[in-house]
């Protein structure tokens, strides 16, 4: 009889193995940051390998690497996104903040920062297509630069010597253009500059063709032409390189691209826009037969005008010839008038000379009166008189000053200290040369210098005493 296993205890406190032993309880798993991030990355990228996200572009950054970093946002959330350089180069339009678009790509989690973002494979604008937005963006940019300004547009020559057409030689547009052109003006030289007008690199070929066409001799007009098509077919004529080549072209340019309803950037940059290549041929040249008829009509009008003018001039000459008298009588009258004028001139000259001679005599008399010899005599007499007057004044002033000097000298002599010394007084000086006024100014043993009326003495102080003043 088989052995039965013991029954499992009916308790929720812990778990038991097959033999009824309690199994130690295990707590919740603890993840490292890298482990958790790696698992989230696998779940996120595995769940969303390819998504389309609609939103508005904001926080656009364009570093030097060429990658585009931006944020897609709506009313409730935002999502970081990146468009790498390879995909960014394929964009036909310029990514801007505020542009609503649909981004295709995959969700990726960047482990070092723990943030996720949308890695875009491509973006498409909402509403208008990418090409239309690129068209409007380039149009706005070139318009701000003044490339569409009417004042820079040039007029086409009245009759070009040679026309250069930049187009595809195998296209129907060039055949229509040549057919209409030669029907209107046969034998007009046309230079075909071959260039691709559709596909990758077509814009660069068109731009190079414009430069080459303008460099050819006697080319007066450069035409870029293509037949109709979709916006994608005509896109080469919406490239910036073509627009700038048209604006830099030294000769007038004509844009004849597409049908009448098709507009390209080239139409705005060219000097003249033609609705179709056929219309371009009609705008560039007039009908030769009409020009010849017009020239013949103008020649006839000019001939009639010249004949009429000759008739008027002949009639005027006859009238003037009738008014002219005998030349010999006119010469005689002119001689008589010349004689009268000569006589009047001689009389006037004689009167002028007599008046000047009288004025000269008066001036000579005045000059004689002002002769330097006469003036010297008068001045000599005046100097003698002034010398006598000056001598008398000097003698009087000298006598007055001598008298005053003698009075002042007497007063000075009476007040002179030498006169006091002559009466037997003396003046004592200390060693520093100061006059002594009191015996207290010196001490016994000091040397003194005594000034007398006649000579000086040196003395030594034996004693010094001060005489007390008597009180009144």
Image (cartoon, grey):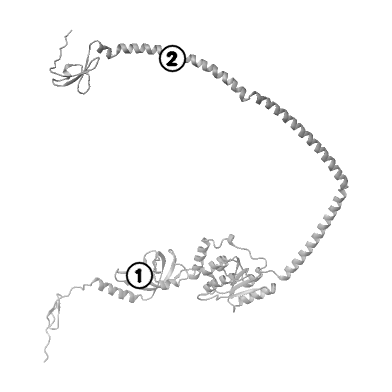
Residue 89 located left or right of residue 249: left
Q: Residue at x 29, y 73 (%)?
A: 40
Quadrant, the N terminus: bottom left
- Residues 242 and 120: in front is 242
Residue 462 located left or right of residue 341: left
Residue 184 located left or right of residue 343: left
Residue behind mark 1: 117
Number of callouts: 2
Q: Position of residue 307 (x, y in %)?
A: 82, 60
Name the disc covering residue 398, or none: 2
> Label 1 vs label 2: CA separation?
125 Å
SS class, disc 2: helix
- Residues 369 and 451: in front is 451
The reply to whether callout 1 and callout 2 are in contact (CB within 8 Å) is no
SS class, disc 1: strand
Q: Position of residue 306 (x, y in %)?
A: 80, 60
- Residues 397 and 99: in front is 397
Q: Residue at x 66, y 25 (%)?
A: 368
Q: Position of residue 117 (x, y in %)?
A: 35, 70
Quadrant, the C terminus: top left
Residue 438 located left or right of residue 96: left
**Between discs 1 and 2, the one toward the N terminus:** 1
Asked which quadrant contains residue 29, the reply is bottom left
Look at the image and tell me whether residue 108 can be seen. yes
Look at the image and tell me whether residue 231 can be seen. no
- Examine the rendered structure and indicate whether residue 319 appears above or below residue 200: above
* In front: label 1 or label 2: 2
- Examine the rendered structure and indicate whether residue 171 appears above or below residue 403: below
Neighbourhood count class around disc 2 (C-alpha, 10 Å): few under 14, some 14–19, many 20 upward: few
Q: Position of residue 190 (x, y in %)?
A: 64, 74
Asked which quadrant contains residue 73, the reply is bottom left
């Amino acid at each position: 009889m088989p052995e039965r296993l013991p029954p499992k205890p009916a308790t929720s406190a812990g778990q038991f193995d097959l033999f009824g032993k309690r199994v130690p309880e295990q707590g919740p798993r603890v993840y490292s940051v890298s482990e958790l991030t790696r698992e989230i990355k696998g779940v996120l990228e595995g769940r969303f390998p390819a998504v389309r996200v609609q939103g508005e572009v904001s926080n656009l950054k364009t570093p030097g690497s060429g990658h585009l970093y931006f944020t897609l946002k709506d009313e409730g959330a935002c999502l970081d996104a990146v468009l790498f350089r390879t995909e960014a180069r394929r964009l036909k339009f310029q990514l801007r903040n505020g542009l609503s678009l649909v981004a295709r790509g995959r969700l990726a989690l960047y482990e070092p920062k723990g943030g996720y973002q949308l890695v875009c494979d491509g973006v498409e604008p909402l509403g208008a297509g990418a090409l239309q937005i690129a068209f409007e963006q380039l149009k706005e940019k070139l318009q701000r630069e003044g490339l569409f300004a009417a004042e820079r547009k040039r007029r086409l020559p009245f009759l070009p010597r040679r026309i250069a057409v930049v187009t595809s030689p195998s296209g129907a547009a060039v055949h229509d253009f040549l057919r209409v052109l030669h029907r209107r003006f046969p034998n007009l030289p046309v230079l075909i500059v071959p260039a691709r007008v559709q596909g990758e690199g077509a814009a660069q070929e068109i731009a190079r063709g414009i430069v080459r066409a303008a460099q050819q001799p006697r080319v007066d007009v450069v035409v870029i032409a293509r037949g109709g098509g979709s916006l994608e077919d005509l896109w080469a004529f919406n490239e910036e390189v073509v627009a700038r080549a048209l604006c830099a072209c030294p000769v007038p340019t004509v844009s004849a691209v597409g049908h009448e309803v098709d507009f390209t950037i080239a139409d705005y940059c060219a000097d003249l826009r033609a609705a179709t290549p056929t219309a371009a041929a009609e705008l560039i040249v007039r009908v030769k037969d009409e020009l010849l008829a017009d020239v013949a009509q103008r020649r006839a009008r000019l001939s009639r005008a010249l004949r009429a003018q000759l008739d008027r001039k002949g009639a005027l000459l006859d009238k003037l010839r009738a008014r002219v008298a005998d030349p010999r009588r006119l010469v005689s009258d002119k001689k008589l008038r010349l004689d009268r004028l000569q006589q009047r001139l001689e009389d006037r000259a004689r009167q002028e000379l007599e008046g000047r001679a009288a004025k000269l005599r008066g001036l000579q008399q005045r000059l004689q009166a002002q002769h330097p010899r006469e003036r010297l005599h008068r001045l000599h007499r005046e100097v003698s008189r002034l010398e006598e007057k000056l001598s008398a004044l000097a003698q009087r002033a000298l006598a007055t000053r001598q008298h005053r000097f003698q009075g002042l000298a007497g007063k000075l002599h009476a007040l002179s200290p030498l006169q006091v010394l002559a009466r037997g007084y003396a003046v004592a000086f200390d060693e520093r040369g100061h006059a002594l006024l009191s015996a207290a100014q010196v001490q016994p043993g000091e040397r003194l210098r005594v000034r007398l009326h006649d000579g000086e003495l040196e003395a030594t102080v034996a004693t010094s005493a001060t005489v007390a003043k008597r009180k009144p």
